[in-house]
């Protein structure tokens, strides 16, 4: 059952904010892609961040597509939040999460084919990924007998918010350890911030039109995703422009991340460490 808009103007504003969020958020992947391509290197880009990001967007795609396309899940949503409430997922949400999954796969492929120094994916990150997918399997098994599909995808939505928080930490910590943001695109950060802002504005517009804030509690994951993105983007801007402004001069010593060593992404326990500098493994 489609809930009507009270204001055609607010409906247009909602649609505009939604597709602005899609365009800006989707575009945020490309500065990093082109930076990697031009350098033929992913040195300075944290692989843990990429892998966690891909898992997060996969869960978000499952949530968005399920709630947007499935009449059964939409009915369960209305049963829980009221039949006078709009579904809080729009077409732009499905389009964005689909695009995000594809682009994170492309970025991970760049990690495989380009020079990457001696960075590897940490065991902590692999442990998190394994726990996430085991949880997906267990919750799916629990939901199947009672067909509690809304509960199931809500679990996925909660996990993607947790991953959205965790995924930024490895990159922020790496920047802190090497006292540099070289290799990590600041253009990506600006676009990500604007996308989060537009995404949040879209939800506010719907709430104003419906005179209800249920869409915030009904899709808390989307709200927290926007806020978490904007918080960490501001942190990255602070690191880039205040703490570690780029200093590219011929007299500067080369960064430790510019070492031309290529090692496996995931190290075995028996593999010797590189001796030129210690590897910082982070979440």
Image (cartoon, grey):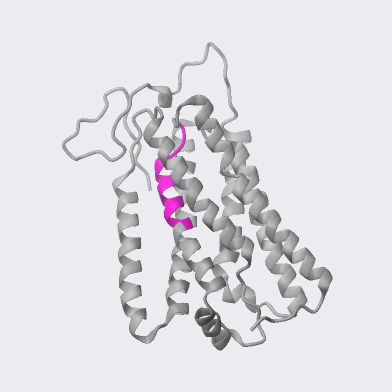
Please tell me in which quadrant of the rendered image residue 197 appears.
Answer: bottom right
* Point 63% across, 34% down: residue: 241
Q: Residue 191 at x, y = what percent?
A: 64, 45
**In this rendering, is residue 69 above or below 18?**
below
Q: Position of residue 278 (x, y in %)?
A: 31, 30
User: How many marks on residues?
Assistant: 0
Determine the residue located farthest toward the left in the rendered image: 270
- Above or below residue 133? Residue 110 is above
Placement of 37 over or under 64, stated as above or below: above
Q: From the image, which quarter does the N terminus lie in? A: bottom right
Can see residue 6? Answer: yes
Q: Is residue 180 visible?
A: no
Which contiguous range is marked in magenta?
44-57
| Residue 15 is a magenta residue | no
- Image quarter for residue 270? top left
Q: Find residue 162 and report its horizontal and vertical position in percent.
A: 46, 61
Q: Is residue 125 left or right of residue 202?
A: left
Residue at x-position 36% and y-position 80%:
143
At horizontal 74% and vertical 66% (from top left) the residue drawn is 14
Determine the residue located farthest toward the top in the rendered image: 251
Front position in the image: 31 or 260:
31
**Residue 55 is one of the magenta-drawn residues:** yes
- Tell me if 224 is positioned left or right of 155 in this view: right
Q: Identify the residue at image location x=34%, y=41%.
A: 281
Residue 136 shown left or right of residue 241 in the figure: left
Left or right side of 272 for 165: right
Pinpoint residue 181: horizontal percent, then vertical percent: 53, 33
Question: Hey, which quadrant is residue 261 in on the image?
Answer: top left
Q: Is residue 279 above or below residue 196?
A: above
Of 282 and 57, which appears nearest the observer?
Answer: 57
Q: Main secondary structure of the magenta part?
A: helix
């Amino acid at each position: 059952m489609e809930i009507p808009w009270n204001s055609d103007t607010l409906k247009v504003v909602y649609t505009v904010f939604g597709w602005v969020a899609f365009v800006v958020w989707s575009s945020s992947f490309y500065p990093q892609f082109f930076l990697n391509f031009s350098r033929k290197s992913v040195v300075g880009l944290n692989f843990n961040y990429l892998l966690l990001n891909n898992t997060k967007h996969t869960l978000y795609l499952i949530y968005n597509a399920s709630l947007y396309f499935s009449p059964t899940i939409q009915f369960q949503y209305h049963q829980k939040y009221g039949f006078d409430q709009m579904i809080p997922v729009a077409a732009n949400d499905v389009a964005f999460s689909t695009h995000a999954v594809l682009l994170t796969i492309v970025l991970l492929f760049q990690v495989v084919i380009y020079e990457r120094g001696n960075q590897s994916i940490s065991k902590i990150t692999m442990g998190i990924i394994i726990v996430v997918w085991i949880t997906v399997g267990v919750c799916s098994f629990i939901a199947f007998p009672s067909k509690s599909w809304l509960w199931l995808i809500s679990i996925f939505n909660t996990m993607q918010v947790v991953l959205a928080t965790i995924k930024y930490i490895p990159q922020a910590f790496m920047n802190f350890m090497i006292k540099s943001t070289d290799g990590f695109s600041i253009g990506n950060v600006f676009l990500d911030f604007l996308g989060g802002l537009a995404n949040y504005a879209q939800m506010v517009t719907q709430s104003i039109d419906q005179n209800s804030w249920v869409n915030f509690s009904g899709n808390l994951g989307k709200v927290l995703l926007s806020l978490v993105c904007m918080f960490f983007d501001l942190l990255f801007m602070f690191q880039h422009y205040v703490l570690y402004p780029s200093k590219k001069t011929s007299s500067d010593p080369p960064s430790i991340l510019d070492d031309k060593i290529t090692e496996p992404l995931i190290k075995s326990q028996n593999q010797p460490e590189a001796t030129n500098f210690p590897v910082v493994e982070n979440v």
